Amino acid sequence: MGRLSLAAFVLAAALVQTLAALPAFSIIVAMLIASIASMAIAVWQRARLRSSRIKFFIWPLLAFTLGASLAMVRADLRLADALDPELEGGSIPTVFRIASLSTTGQQGQRAEVDILESRKGMPSRIQLAWFGDPRRQEAWAPGQRWQGYLVPKRPHGGINPHGFDYEALLFERGVRATASIRNNPVLLADEPYATPLIAIQRLRHFLRKAMQQTLGDTRYGPVLIALAIGDQAGIARNDWVVFNRTGITHLVSISGMHVTMLAAMAGLAVLRVWSRARWRGVPLAEYSPAQVVAAGAALFTALLYCLLAGWGVPAQRTFFMLAVLAIAAIARLPLSGSRVLVLAAACVVALDPWASLAPGFWLSFGAVAVLMMAGTGRWRLAKPGETPARLSRWQRWRRGFIAACQLQLAITIGLIPLLVLIFQQISLVSPLANAIAIPVVSFIVTPLALLVMVLAAIPGLETVANWTGIVAHESFAWAMRPIEAMSDWPGSNIAVAAVPWPWIAVAMAGIVWSLQPRGLPGRMLALLLVLPVLVYQPKRPAHGEWRATMLDVGQGGGVVIETADEIVVFDAGPRYSDDADAGDRVIWPYLRARGVGRIDQLIVSHGDADHAGGLASLMTALPVGILRAPSSMEEQVDAARPTGRVSPPLTACHAGQQWQTGGVMFTMLAPLPSMVGAKDKNAGGCVLFMQGRAHNAMFMGDVGIAQEAALLAEPLWPGPVDLIVAGHHGSHTSSGQAFVDATQAVHAVMQAGYLNRYRHPNQAVLRRWEQSGAQVHRSDHHGAIIVTSREGQLDAVRARDAQRRYWHTRATSD
């Protein structure tokens, strides 16, 4: 009953995070008061409830109501701490304090800051960026108080089907606005001990700086820092690719295994010392049992390590599980593994109702649950009544090795449904890679990384710290050699389509049944229930129909067109930074979720970075059948070609090109002969038109009004258009009045970044399209727009409406 009630509490808090809007605050408070009062009455009447069957419903129901109301109260209070839209985009004088570790890149530095003095309507915590050359900037440190002019905006991130929700991440962290600094700020004071949390962050800052000086520019130095203090910002993008493909990502951070290991070491050390030590001739164990002191020492060590790690979900989960075990040991309470697990989950959710938004929450608790079931179920090697004392040393070692391999295999299989649901990727080499990495990272690299941290912080021990760092780095580097080779194996990592949740539920039921103890029938056959999630494919358009998804890539272009037979990608999205672009962050994840394993036609309208920035990432992620782009992009395309993979030659797009696939005719309307070779990349860009059985669509790239007029005068001009992606993100240089009148568009889409510096889309252009009768969609306001053409029906869905959550930023014009 207690486990069911705690599970209901956790489930309620998680379901609150799926709401599009919260009830009125008065209703939430009424729910909270009613749930607390009902639970008090239930406790008072527990003797009567104990003999009634209603107890099986009343306690879980009350726990569910309490969990939901508590989560909603916390959410409503956080929503109230919002940026006033009137301040958005202004230059606001502000005094702020650095509240987190700063992240430094080539474009400047970024950190979370607490607002101390500002105008009314500025939230208490924001994420602040200081753009510029970091070598000319003073490095931020937690506790520093600065003054400067900030340009704030409400939290905003791209909203795409099956995509990452950046706004959810900011909301969970309590960040209620983002901002950049105008000009240079002024340092007012340094207050490293302003609050306990600031003091912890300052300590992490000091330790990170000491480790950076010790490890230098070594390749895996950032990994050692991540293992010691949980800061993963310095890990290279290519290394993350290897970690993800081989399934060892959980090992390159402070995981539950590392926290447990360190706590156990501290507990065993205290146990041995306390059990032997004396005070005035009396054993210390007579004052307090050694087991109790050891449990307290282990828990205290775990708390310090978790705080040093940044208090992430895996660290929270491990600490609360250890806390429950320690308290149970001290109080001599027998608790089963499932009770410990669900109680730890309830503690995490009570402290952080948004913990369920993090994939790590479900993966962490899921992995522990699988381990618990595997240790007592069909994966267990020990026979009933068998004790280790009856086995030889060789048998114990052999049994332990096989058990470890079986548990790793159980985790790999057991987490398949969650990995498919969250990431749409599964690593087939994960068991082998973890078999190599777990012992090395857990028992060699992590202790050495912690030792480097301690030695680097002590003056005079720099040489010892350097040598220790070399040993730790080379140990990890040697372990990574076979793992890197595995990541390059064909089929080491498979991508699967996004699966509807009922299929996931069936697969999880099969996993649970397969892990049950011996004697239950059909345990092996239950694993067959996992197969559907691995082979599921979303329904493709029928012959002559099409589906176009204008993705929310920010300030740039990126469209995925699906027909019955082919996948066409028009534009590869913008480049965000030196190690991030829309091809890798937005377009490829969407294609993966749609079950796409090949791009049949990749068309890049022109060579500007906001349309071709993700070209290299797309060509690396997926094989491409035909690549079309202006002839002027020859060198740019060659530079983007992946090594080790055959890529198609560039087919220069020009007016008059036609091909048909899946009953849909594609026609290239531009560049016209007069546009080829134009100095202006926009003018010489590709314009694509497609005609399905019932509807058509046109994709304009960045061509301007002059090119639009030339298109209207050509025999190829198709006439009225059902769907148009307006030129140049809705700039005033495109969408001329004559062109808008001629298209008679039903739907007009503008792909633009939120509050972009170009002020796209232009208000006059928006009015022009609206007055023409078109329904206007903006990716900066509406997220991705999915338009589906069926016989006699043209449907348009806005992702920000379909995937609405209560924390999402709403445009002022909505």
Image (spheres, rainbow, N blue to C red):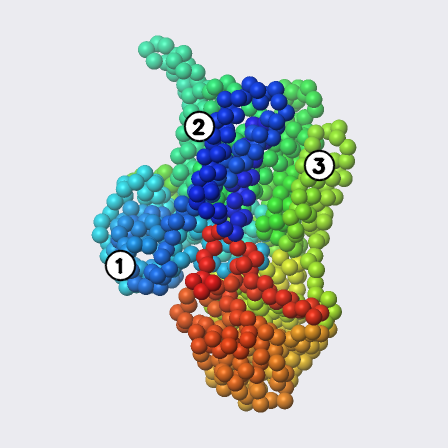
Secondary structure beneath label 1: strand
Q: CA distance from mark 1 to mark 2?
A: 47 Å
- State the residue position of label 3: 514
Secondary structure beneath label 2: helix
Q: Earlier in the sequence, mark 1 or mark 3?
A: 1
Quadrant where the N terminus is found in the figure: top right
Q: Earlier in the sequence, mark 1 or mark 2?
A: 1
| Residue depth check, mark 1 versus mark 3: number of the one nearer the observer | 1
- The residue at 51%/66% (across/down) is 779
Residue 370, horizontal then vertical, whole percent: 62, 36
- State the residue position of label 2: 298
Q: CA distance from mark 3 to mark 2?
A: 35 Å
- State the residue position of label 1: 93
Closer to us: 413 or 19: 19
Q: Are the two marked residues, 3 and 2, in contact with CB atoms closer than 8 angstroms?
A: no
Secondary structure beneath label 3: helix
- The residue at 62%/63% (across/down) is 622
Q: CA distance from mark 1 to mark 3?
A: 61 Å
